[in-house]
Image: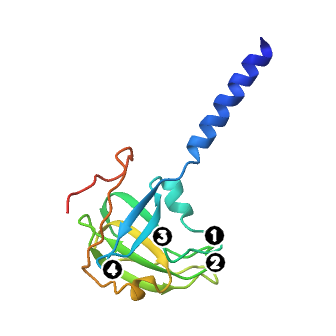
Amino acid sequence: MKRKSVLAVSLFLLFCSSQAGKKSFVKIYFPNGFAVTAELAVTDEQRQQGLMFREKLNTDQGMLFLFEEEGTHSFWMKNMRFSIDILWLDAQKRIIHLEPNVPPCSSDPCPSYIPGAPAMYVLELRSGCAEQQGLRLYDRVAFVLPKNLSGPQNPRP
């Protein structure tokens, strides 16, 4: 009986830990039809971690940061191993600020990158992707967030 209880508790804990570490992704479509699969950063912990310590980001990958409300969300490149493009999007998913080819931080204090207007989302892409795909200010990207997120709503286009 004790063995069954220990096994049941172990399986439950294993299930809970796998659910806690589960990553969510969304497909993001650019105006030219190109799409990237972006990992979602919804919680404070996920947003703080971002792409730190990762080895690379493929051309068809990204990370989308979700915020509860529009604001001037600043980003830095601490513990990054490669350059990226950073795009700030408003609630209508329009690019309101773009920082191309942002290099990793080489010494403290790391510079912060701040948008010129309030943003609801921030999209990080492989360095050079914005230029390769012809992305410009006020271009609109398209994505639908999963309904089970506790982040911002899915405003209609």
Q: Earlier in the sequence, mark 3 or mark 2?
A: 3
Q: Residue at x 79, y 18 (%)?
A: 3
Q: Relative to residue 81, is residue 70 drawn left or right?
A: left
First-in-chain label (4 vs 3)? 3
Instruction: Give the labeled residue for mark 1.
Output: 54
Query: Residue at label 4?
Result: 97
Q: x%, y% of residue 103? A: 55, 85
The residue under label 3 is which amino acid type?
Gly
Q: Quadrant of residue 110?
A: bottom right
- Front of the two marks 1 and 3: 3
**Which numbered marker is on residue 62?**
3
Q: Can residue 74 be seen in this view?
A: no
Q: From mark 3 to mark 2, how far is it between C-alphas?
A: 15 Å
* Residue named by callout 2: 81
Q: Is residue 7 visible?
A: yes
Q: How many neighbours does mark 3 have within 10 angstroms: few (below 14), some (14-19), or many (20 or more)?
A: many
